[in-house]
Image (tube, rainbow, N blue to C red):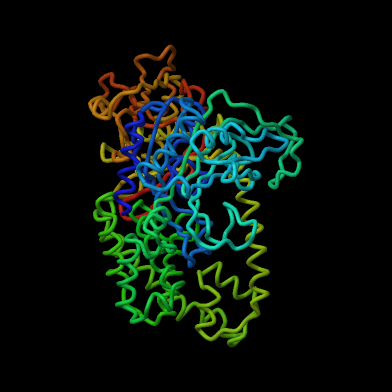
Amino acid sequence: MTAKELKKRYLDFFVKKGHKIIPNVSLVPENDPTTLFISAGMHPLVPYLLGEPHPLGKRLVSLQRCLRTSDIDEVGNVTHNSFFEMLGNWSLGDYWKKEAIEWSFEFLTKELKIPAEKLYVTCFVGDQDAPKDEESASFWRSLGIPSSRIFFLSKEDNWWGPAGQTGPCGPDTEMFIDTGKKPCQKKCQPGCSCGKYFEVWNDVFMQYEKKLKTQNSKLKTDGSNYKDYEFIPLKQKNVDTGMGVERTVAVLSGLDDDYQTELFSPIIRIIEEISGKRYQENQKEFRIIADHLRAATFAIADGVVPGKVEQGYVLRRLIRRTIDQETKLGFTNNFKPLLEEIINIYKDDYPELDKNKDNIYKIFGEEKTKYSQIITKTLRYEVKAKGKKISGEEAFNLYATHGLSPQQLRDQGYEFPQEEFDKAFKKHQEISRAGAEKKFAGGLADHSETVTKYHTATHLLNAALRQILGPHVFQKGSNITAERLRFDFPNPRKLTEEELKNTEELVNQKIKENLPVKMEMMTLEEAKKRGAAAVFGEKYGGKVKVYSIDPSTSPSTTSPSTVSSGLSNRSGPSGSGQPFSVEVCGGPHVDFTGKLGKFKIRKEEAVGAGVRRLYAVLE
């Protein structure tokens, strides 16, 4: 079965079960500072899993592109991919375990034609936080799966979440296919890494909320102080499932190597032609090149540019690791034939790849040139006084600063103790992990009161910029934390001090007017007729949430005379009584602008040709 057929069958199956298809969104999360990339199909749904009504209803299904940075160093074996596609279906407080399990079984056995006797399942064994999931097991038995093929495992294997230290979580049941391989040992069972059992699907039952018992409690990341928190049954119980496209296609095709499926084999053939080497003799290098090029291509198409931090750092690392493998294989051709093939494979489902192909080629070329300059110039200057022998810590600093891998350094003739490099790398990981734990403490998306205020402030800023600069302004990207907002928008030049001042004062004027923030659900066409801003048009489904900030319905206002610049008290862009701001957005937002406090622009800078960035805070 091809990937295209698998994706169509999955979506069609759940549409027949009353699900609505939600769009495949950008790899870069919108207004979610707690994760660099979308790494699971449920990420765009976090507000709705927490209780907000979804415009398309309570039954949803999707195909979502994902990128997991934690897997980059694992790429090179038969299964790991940094970029992948994830199929998933959701129940937002609607159906529960019985329907989810029955439909999983039906899809696997009827649609995918997997013999029922090859299916094995696992369920949660139970612990001090939640009981053994006999409920799920009973439904599997009713479908004909005998107890001998049902295994109960611990939280490590059969529990999802929470994403942070607290939040929605619950047991899951996982489905495996017996590949027919010989077991590695007598007690070999689903979850074993030997390859006999392949996990094809995972149904998560979000039925608890992990909460601190007291505000003074502080959870340890290993969960060892479990007495400080409790698991409270959720009012809205959700089903969240996931099926990886690449791995499932491999197994359904009788392959034990993802890179031999039609998603990778055309790329592998081109690498063979360019390098003159065979895949079977250089599997690790071929897999890294194919995987990283695919991930980087999608990241660039979604607006990421190489840089020193966050998404930009990941992209740079992907490209430079690809160059390293290219060097090992002994070819120096540009990546264009490979990039063209990747775009060709995915352009039907992701037209943005073809649309942005020139920029993709350009960024790869520029990054390759920069990396070459670092190797030939920067590296020589930084170590020339020490000769070819450097310490492991110095080697790590070159890796952290310039992206030069240990192998790349050795290829240039430099010697250093690997154990010293590993020690420095481990220390760096511990520091990064500590920072990540602090950053991710609120879960996948921070919906705190402060962040909610910043969401609304972003709408005011967007509307104000359109009035001050013109209708060419729109939200090209944003990032919100509990400390500030960041807003990217097209503009051909740097803003003047007067423009910045007027923008800031207009936002503050609308805050002082204490305008109501109203939400309505409507079709995208209706939203466009209302003049709503809908920047990421391709991601919206049948119905959308439209937030309007309208002076005409405000219960109390403050005289515009308080605004020193003399800005008019216009409602909308035309000054004709239209709402000040109308935007399609998933939220969350405050109910009145007066709750925001004082708005202050801290910084304005360029982030690319014709794109400006503003940083602002609420005081």
Measured as percent of width and height from the top left, residue 595 is found at 51, 23
Measured as percent of width and height from the top left, residue 298 is found at 36, 55
Instruction: Say left or right for 398 vs 556.
Output: right
Instruction: Say left or right for 496 vs 238.
Output: left
Would residue 173 be seen by someone viewing this image from the given angle? yes
Measured as percent of width and height from the top left, residue 326 is found at 40, 76
Instruction: Say left or right for 153 vs 492.
Output: right
**Residue 158 quadrant:** top right
Would residue 467 be seen by someone viewing this image from the given angle? no
Q: Residue at x 32, y 70 (%)?
A: 335
Quadrant the C terminus occupies: top right
Against 149, residue 367 (above or below) is: below
Q: Residue at x 39, y 33 (%)?
A: 60
Measured as percent of width and height from the top left, residue 398 is found at 56, 72
Q: Residue at x 52, y 60 (%)?
A: 195
**Residue 10 quadrant:** top left
